[in-house]
Amino acid sequence: MVRQNKKILEILDSVRSEKRFELTEIESKSILNFVSVPIIDTRLADDAEAAVRFASAFEYPVVLKIASPDILHKFDAKGVATNLTNEEEVEKSFKELLRNAKKYNAHARIWGVTVQKHIPRGIEVIVGAVRDPIFGPAVMFGMGGIWIELMKDVSFRLAPTTKESALEMISEIQGYPLLQRFRGGEHVNLEVIAEIIVKISKLISTYPEISEIDVNPIFARADDAIAVDARIVLRHD
Amino acid sequence: MTGKLKSTKTTKLSKAKQNVRAIFEPRSITLIGSSKIVEEVGMTSPKLFADVAYNLQTYFEGRVNIFDIETRSTLGKSDLTILALPPQKSLNWAGKAMNTGTKAIIQLTGGFDAAQRAKYFKLALKHHVRVLGPNTIMGIINTRVGLNTTFERNLMPPVGNISVISQSGGVGATLLDWASYYDIGVSKFVFMGDKVDIDDENVLEYLASDPKTRVIAMYIEGIKNGRKFVELSRKITARKPIVVLKGGITQESAQRALSHTASVAGSDEIFNAAFKDAGIIRVGDIEDLFTASVALASQPPMRGKNVCIVSNVGGPAILAADEVAKAELELAHLSEETKQKVQKAYPGIDLINPIDLIADARADRYRNVLKLVLEDSQVDGVMVINMLKSCFFEPEDAKVIPEVASRYDKPVVDVPVGGEDFIKVANVLKGTGMPTYNLPSKAALALRILYEYGRRQC
């Protein structure tokens, strides 16, 4: 735990020394990995050749996503390519994602493209955290993917929270029945999601320099849950 | 050395708490005002002075001293000093009152600038005197000792167990008017004002330890120290319910959102989370604040979701069943034993919940069926419906409801649906501790809140 703490502080320090407030996807995922949030292994490729190399190491199919601190909504920017099954598709998608990103925002800083394994989708949920000026850190759970934007189907608790409260948060959202009746009676593993909520609530409570966390989407499945994307933002003051 | 230091600190602390008590439970009061000064803009006026003096002299059980600075000069000692003068004059007289050994001050009038407020606070700290206000305008009410520092003549709610804290003078006045008009039993009433010294937490602590307060109802617009408020409230709600109405729910969080989470984390969502963590019951409007408070002040918490409806009419009972479902409660399934007992006593009564006692039901039938239903372990709470029109039921018959209910540790609420029928039955039940509602939606909300508080206490 002490070692993990040291590694997290190293990442936070290096981000601040570069006068950045937003962590890259890779940095965000590393931190989540250190606090044992199940997260998909992801690499940053700065050219198509590297992307192909990572893709074959992960085994096909893979997912490519644009890596830019200026693009929050990757889908809107056509910055995601899923279910790529061979070298040619990876090479082609790499170039396409860069083109799309430039078209979406000509001034966007582009760090490259991330590569990760394409995994079977589960129900998409989000776990997040913010720092409120009056009440301090708070943790959020909701239906993820596009649902967070459209429906705002979320629940909050002050952080850190307990597993008991986390389970209550899950049961409070409108989409709760979807989590209970997933694929013909099978329900998603709510315990695992509750544990992620608790871990994220502890993360923002432990590191006062963090102001916002998005773990979105998390694929919630019958046996487990795995986070596919993440974003951590630091305080400006 | 350290031991001595520690004990001095403890006495100072408890003295500070003692002096908060003096705001609510003084044995003697001095009201300082002027029969001449009229502020250009502000509340100081001979009229306000006279009206507050009237209420103090009319209601207060202890010694009241009305001190007009235009005619008198030597200030005597009293537990509580009430000030209704412009800022500078108030400060001067506050200093004099503190020198005579007053324990607490209610600064009714406002208009103090930042420097004057700081000076007031420093003075209070130095003398260990607690100050409510400035700009509380209406001050406080303690119905049990007849303490009423408001300038609304003869506005006095009945004695009860609900204590109200308002961060707004206007909303507070509305709540006071509401409670007085609808005969809602009040213990203490506090208008917080500008909080130069006594803050929400101080008042909450006092009310938490006050045996005459069973429910704390609050109108909140903002909170200074969120975590402190949550910690304190969590401790209180384990023993005593807090119901909150929060104003300003459309205010968005000021922070720039770089994440999905921050973009949906408005200040209201976080307030909601904080209230949940604190075990605070949140309501949506003024009427619901009292609906909830009255139920919590008079009925035991509900230990499960199963509600039984006992009615003398069919249609209104069906509407009531709908409201029970909307409140996310359930209709209880009576046990076979209960069904058989009711059937034996009253053949022909349909025992599918809601139970229709038929339009000729009078006190006896209500009494006997209510007893059987409340004894059933599959029933957690009861909603009684008793219409007068189109039925044989007489207002006096309603007396059996609190009589039976008081023997069981389960909540019972009464709905004499309608207008005149409601007033007639409510008048009969006044002072019995039986909450009456003119609509089943309000009764369902009351039961829902009793259920939520029951869960909090588990």
Image: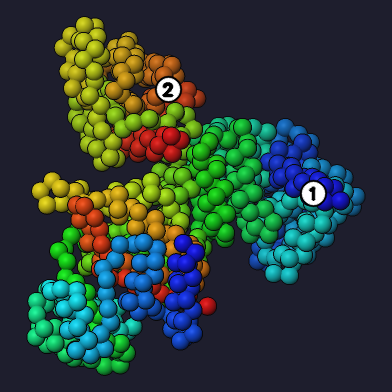
Instruction: Say which amino acid is labelled 1.
Output: Lys
For the C terminus of chain B, the quadrant is: top left
Rendered location of residue B14, percent (x, y): 75, 44
Looking at the rendered structure, the number of numbered marks drawn on it comes to 2
Q: Nearer the viewer, residue B250 or B180?
A: B250
Q: Chain of mark 1?
A: B
Q: Chain of mark 2?
A: B
Both marks 2 and 1 on one chain:
yes
Task: Tell me the residue that label 1 is attached to.
Answer: B6
Rendering quarter of residue B20:
top right
- Spatial CA span between label 2 and label 1: 45 Å
Rendering quarter of residue B91:
bottom right
Rendering quarter of residue B30:
top right
Task: Tell me the residue that label 2 is attached to.
Answer: B409
Residue sitting at 33 percent across and 48 percent down?
Answer: A167
Q: Are marks 2 and 1 in contact (CB under 8 Å)?
A: no
Q: Is residue B80 left or right of residue A212?
A: right
Q: Nearer the viewer, residue A75 or B154?
A: A75
Instruction: Say which amino acid is labelled 2.
Output: Asp
